[in-house]
Amino acid sequence: MHSNFFKIFIWILMGIAAVSCANRGTPSGGEKDLIPPTIIRSTPENFSTNFDAKEIRIYFDEYIKIKDLQKQLIISPPMDPEPDITPLGTASKYIKIIINDTLDANTTYAFNFGQSIVDNNEENPYPYYRYVFSTGSYIDSLSVKGSIMDSEKREADKFVSVMLYEMDSTFTDSIIYKKKPKYVTNTLDSVTSFSIDNIKAGKYLLVALKDENRNFTFQQRTDKIGFYEKPITIPSDTTYNIKLFKEQLDFDVERPKQSAGQKIQFGYSGDAKDIKIEILDTVPQDFETRITKDKTTDTLYYWYKPKLELDSTLFVVRNKTYIDTLKHRFRDLEKDSLVISQVQSKNPSFEDDFMVSGNIPFVNIDEKRISIMNKDSVNVDFTISYDSLSNNFSLKFPKKEAEDYKIQILPEAFTDFFGNVNDTLNFSVRTKAYDQYGNVRVRLVNPVYPMIVQLTDDKGAVKYEKFATEDLLFDFRYINPGTYYLRVIFDTNGNQKWDSGNYLQKRQAERISHYPNLLDARAGWDLIEEFILEKTNPDPIKN
């Protein structure tokens, strides 16, 4: 009997072992770990003074790793060369920092890790850890606080660098292009407020950058910038509001390139409104030129006739104070063939003109060879306008609701720069019924004219706009149904467009106010909105 009991006992143990082996590696469940890692100690200790170490170690109670260090870590003041920081991509129970820079005397340094320190298993972040030390006998404790906004958009960018430049005897305005700041912080990815901490008393220039290259210097082509116009004196209890903007690029022209027969392209940056292009070679007496702009890129096309029998030439490009001489080498290419196309959709609004565009500059139009007829085959009167830079012809005519219009352009109505003419062209458009559109009326309270009122999509693209120099009800009639954002531009110079700012000229971007609610323009509905504007100076900087 005892023998049988022993055998049963053995079988039970073997069964338990088998079940245990079968379940090996299968988690037993339980609550997810939500606790971030804990710092045990650091050497030298955080907030050390008279710091002279070359290596820093920060120890944790569990394995950690560093995530998105390039975005998250801010060292203030910046070090050059940057320190070596490990671990990167692996797990460790400590962070090691090797300092490669020669540190300034009597200066407080701060390593702002953001949320880059996470535990190895669940990636719970150690939030906004800062390691601070001073090469002097005390830790600087003053700070500058404020918020970041965008001059044009409803929401500010993430990861904006906010910087202080010491305004000492060596300071110049151009320092932001050449040197790293004295102090720096970052708004990271969740907030638009900032705090630059552990700084010493003094006079500073306050600048914010959407620093795309993360080199803490302003690159006009890639970075947005915001700045406080006056020097700030620390200590101060002022909260600073900085608005970012993208500067219009300084004018510059790329080397010309032959893109087709008797057609040379000039890529450019900046404002090309007043550009003049002159060839330096001797040209025939009947030599003619035209300039048009590419529809989508910052490129100008220089058209010329007759063909020049030259291997190369020099061009002088002028634009206001800009002047440059550029060499061009000719290539023997085929000329473009004339293509004429309709610009807008087949369902224009009642205010839209019918527009056609050509790929070669037009030099003549015969209006008698153009006709517009409604669905009853009745001729509709029209007028013509021409934009030579875009090479667009517009036909303006009165439109009725739910009406079909046929536009016929007979041969030789258009003659281009090289003498080409069009074949017969037929286009058709149809207007919608009034009740298929929405109407929006905007009434402004506390306006400062001149003003521009715009309806935009969720990406900020302008869909409809109105300009006024005096009190006006802004009526957007017969617009496509949908949701729109409303914004108002304080058009200070009255040029009917929003103007960005310029750091060197100490000019802020023109003020824009955003209506807080989304507008729902429904078909067949009349929407009336009142926008109460703040009674503030159009200068966007508040002190």
Image: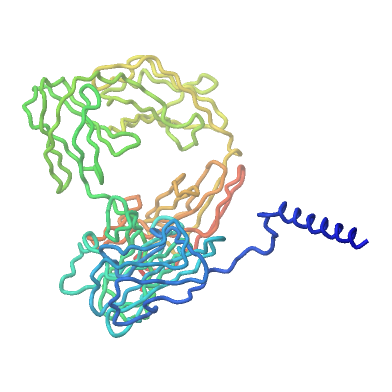
The correct choice, above or below, for 150 with respect to 353 in the image is below
Between 402 and 108, the residue placed more toward the observer is: 108
The correct choice, above or below, for 459 with respect to 161 in the image is above
The correct choice, above or below, for 449 with respect to 371 in the image is below
Way the structure is coloured: rainbow
| Residue shown at 52% from the left, 42% from the top | 479
Relative to residue 302, is residue 128 drawn left or right? right
How many numbered marks does the figure carry? 0
Relative to residue 128, is residue 308 drawn left or right? left
Residue 263 point in image, percent of width and height:
22, 26
Question: Which residue reaches farthest right?
Answer: 1
Residue 135 point in image, percent of width and height:
28, 79
Kindly tell me whether residue 422 is visible in this rendering. Answer: yes
Residue 505 point in image, percent of width and height:
23, 60
Locate the C terminus and report the quarter of the image it occupies: bottom left
Residue 392 point in image, percent of width and height:
34, 30
Between 511 and 363, the residue placed more toward the observer is: 511
| Residue shown at 27% from the left, 82% from the top | 136
Relative to residue 364, is residue 322 drawn left or right? left
Kindly tell me whether residue 150 is visible in this rendering. Answer: no
Locate the N terminus and report the quarter of the image it occupies: bottom right
Would you identify the image quadrant in which residue 181 lies? bottom left
| Residue shown at 71% from the left, 53% from the top | 21
Between 363 and 500, the residue placed more toward the observer is: 500
